[in-house]
Every structure is written in C-alpha cells, then in structure tokens.
Image: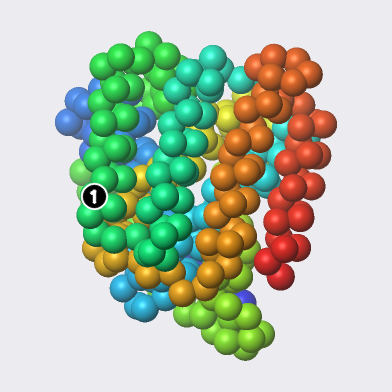
Amino acid sequence: MNLLFIVSGLILLILGGNWLLKSAVSISLRLNIPKIVIGMTVVSFATSAPELIVSVKSALNGFPDLAMGNVVGSNVANLGLVLAVTIILSPIQVERSFYKTDWPVMMISSCVLFGFVAFDNSLQRYEGIILVLFLIIFLIYLLKVQKPAVVEELEVKEEAPLSVLKTGILLGLGGVCLWGGSELLISGAVGMAEFYGVSKRVIAVTVVSIGTSVPELAASIIAVMKKEKAISLGNLIGSNMFNILAVLGVTSIIQPIIINDKGLLTNDIYWMLGISFIILPLVFLPRGLRLGWRDGIILLGLYGIFVWTIL
C-alpha cells in the first residue's frame, strides 16, 4: 500500500507539474513577458513545483529529513543518474557558460548550504532568506549581464497562449494534483520507512529523490531516441541550483528545517558536493567541453556507490 501511495503520488506530481507549467507559460505569453524571463523564472518555478511542494509539506508535517533528503538526493540523482544515462546513450557538447557561470554558482550554492547546516544541524528562516536573495541576484545578473549567453539554453518554444478557460482548468488541475500527490508521496514514504525500519532520510534520498527526477530522465531518453539535442548539462546544473536556493530557501522561510538524521550531514551532503565538483574535470578531460559514455559510466558508478552507502 505504501508503494502504491508513492507511485500514485509521483504520477500526480508529474501531471500536476506539467499542467502547471503549461498554464504558467500561457499566462506569461498573454502578459507579453519576454521568453527569456519566462524560461528563467516561470518555467524554473513550475518544473521545481513538485520538489517545492513535497519539501514544504514534509517540513510542516514534522518530517524535516524528508525535506532536506529530497533536495540532496535529487541533486545527486540529477548528475549521477539522469546525466549519466543521457551521456551513456549519446555524448553531449557542453556550453561555455558551464565553467563561466553554471558550475561556479552551483558549487557556491552547495557550499553555502553546507555552511548553513553543518554547525547547528538546521536551516533557519534568515538563512532561507539569504538563499532566496542569492537566487534573485543571480537571475538579475543573467538577465542584465549574460542575457545573450542564456537565451539559447532557456528558450521557450514559440506558441500561441491557451484559451483563458483551458489555462484556468490546467492551473486548477495542476494545483490539485500537486497537493494530492505530495500528500500521497509523503504518506507512502513515511509508511515505507516505518515498515522497513529505516530512517525517513534513507527513503527521501533514494525513492523520493529518484521519483522526482523521473521527468528529467524520461525527457533525456526520449530526446536521445528522437536524435534530438539531449537535455543539457546547464539545465541539470540549473535544476540543482534551484533546488537549493528556491526549494530549500522557500521551505525554511515557511518552516525552519531541523535535521534529525545525522547521516544527511555526515554522508549525503558530502556526496552532493563531491559529485557536483567532479563534473568539472570530467567536462575537460580527456576532450574539452564534452561528456561521453566513459564519463557516464563513472557518474553512474559513483551514484551506485552513493546508494550503497546509505542502505
């Protein structure tokens, strides 16, 4: 039953996030908001809505380890699983913005998070405000300074906005599915942890985090099968940065996160930092600005070791 709750919750979260994304983009097009602004704000928030809703509700329901574990596990899965499978199937060329902007900001965000939680085992409200402010400053920097560099990566498809009625229906359905999916997912994750006698953090960094990474993984595989450009490294790094700055930032502003399971701080967060760092040498060695199947095997192997260390 717990597994059914988890699977049903993930399906609802995926559907809800997709419908929310379509309605949000439609509203933005009707308001004549520039595409780059839509890509960097509306699309980013909409695609991170499942992680945000799950983390906020987990913290409010008294399961902070689920909130933190979901983000840490998702960040590891995005690079160790999603990116790994993508580049094993098809190599990708890496944009120059990777080492100029994307990777440095992701590492700074990760290190700031580590600094906030390492000493007092918590993410306080004022620390969440700092994370969100950092995100806002970064978005302004991209828009003002590096707009030409990010237009291509964050392009939103040219399309006519949906009708007002359809936009309203999708917005409502998306909200309901996100709420219902988060309830089912959290109930299933807590129930599974109690049934198997493992910590909620273990379920969060494995089942929940992999589940919330399924849309990115599916999109990557479909792109490879259609011989289209695979999901970019910049998008995955951006997702990791957004998970830290927006998801954990907003969650801790609403409800400070107190970490109970020390494994998050003695093991998981170091894996997040390590796998984020190792992307840099992999991109440049042996051939510059390219990731191939050998890099994918290394990342997938590291992810397998990570999962083994927490089970």
Q: Quadrant of residue 29?
A: top left
Residue 158 x/y as whole percent: 38, 23
Residue 245 x/y as whole percent: 36, 45
Query: Circle 1 sits in a helix, a strand or a loop, which is it?
Result: helix
**Chosen colour scheme:** rainbow
Residue at far top of view? 148
In the picture provided, is 243 more to the left or to the right than 262? left
Q: Quadrant of residue 30?
A: top left
The answer to whether residue 209 shows anywhere in this view is: no
Which residue lies at the image location 49% right of the left edge and 36% below the top edge? 107
* The C terminus: image quadrant: bottom right
Which residue lies at the image location 59% right of the left edge and 58% below the top edge? 268
The answer to whether residue 152 shows anywhere in this view is: yes
* The N terminus: image quadrant: bottom right
Q: Nearer the viewer, residue 275 or 117?
A: 117
In the picture provided, is 78 more to the left or to the right than 131? right
Q: Which residue is mark 1?
A: 129
Q: Is residue 257 above or below residue 117?
A: below
Q: Is residue 194 above or below residue 6?
A: below
Residue 9 x/y as whole percent: 49, 69
Residue 204 x/y as whole percent: 55, 67
How many marks on residues? Answer: 1
Which residue lies at the image location 63% right of the left edge and 63% below the top edge? 206
In the picture provided, is 307 more to the left or to the right than 167? right
Which amino acid type is marked by label 1?
A: Ile
Q: Nearer the viewer, residue 206 or 116?
A: 116
Which residue lies at the image location 65% right of the left edge and 17% below the top edge? 289
Q: Nearer the viewer, residue 43 or 273?
A: 273
